[in-house]
Image: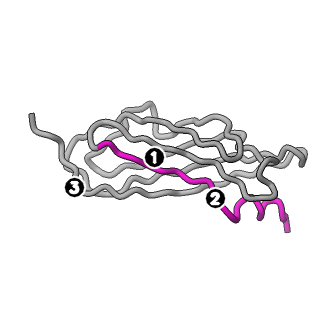
Amino acid sequence: MDCTRDAVITGVLPNVEIQFDGVDALQCNVTYSCPEPLFRTFIAEEAFLTLTVPKGLQLDTDGDQISLGQLQPGETRSVVIPVILEDPVNGEITAEIDLVIRSLWLRDWKETIRVVSRHRITAIERAMV
């Protein structure tokens, strides 16, 4: 049993907060948390955010995976993703965070974890001008 791995993926998990402005942007606040006592010894060497949006909402990006770079324990990274509102939208935005965790004191130890967060949007319609 690898107790360092268990310590990293139990306790307070990384999370993402999703906010939709109802018009043309999603803001995602990704927080990399790591439980004590390992708080300062594991960094997210690479972090990626993947979004899935409901019908009627389209991401205005090159691909569906956004690189967040390296995250330190306790750090929050905000990213604004432009979207195109095509039709009435009623559904769920799903955000997946993939983190490659590296230990600062265990040589050659890496672990990838995935955290999923969901945000419900209901009956948003494009304004008629």
Q: Residue at x 26, y 39 (%)?
A: 23
Residue 52 on the magenta segment: no
The residue beneath circle 2 is 13
Callout 3 secondary element: strand
From the viewer's perspective, is 22 left or right of 115? Answer: left
Marks 1/3: CA–CA distance: 19 Å
Measured along the vertical axis of the image, is residue 75 above or below residue 60? below
| Earlier-in-chain disc, 1 versus 3 | 1
Q: Which residue is mark 3?
A: 123
- Magenta-colored stretch includes residue 12: yes
* Range of residues picked out in magenta: 1-21
Percent across and percent down for residue 40 are 79, 47
Q: CA distance from mark 2 to mark 3?
A: 31 Å
Q: Residue under circle 1? A: 51
**Quadrant of the image for the C terminus?**
top left
> Along the line of sight, which residue is nearer the eye, 95 or 62?
95
Which quarter shows the N terminus? Answer: bottom right
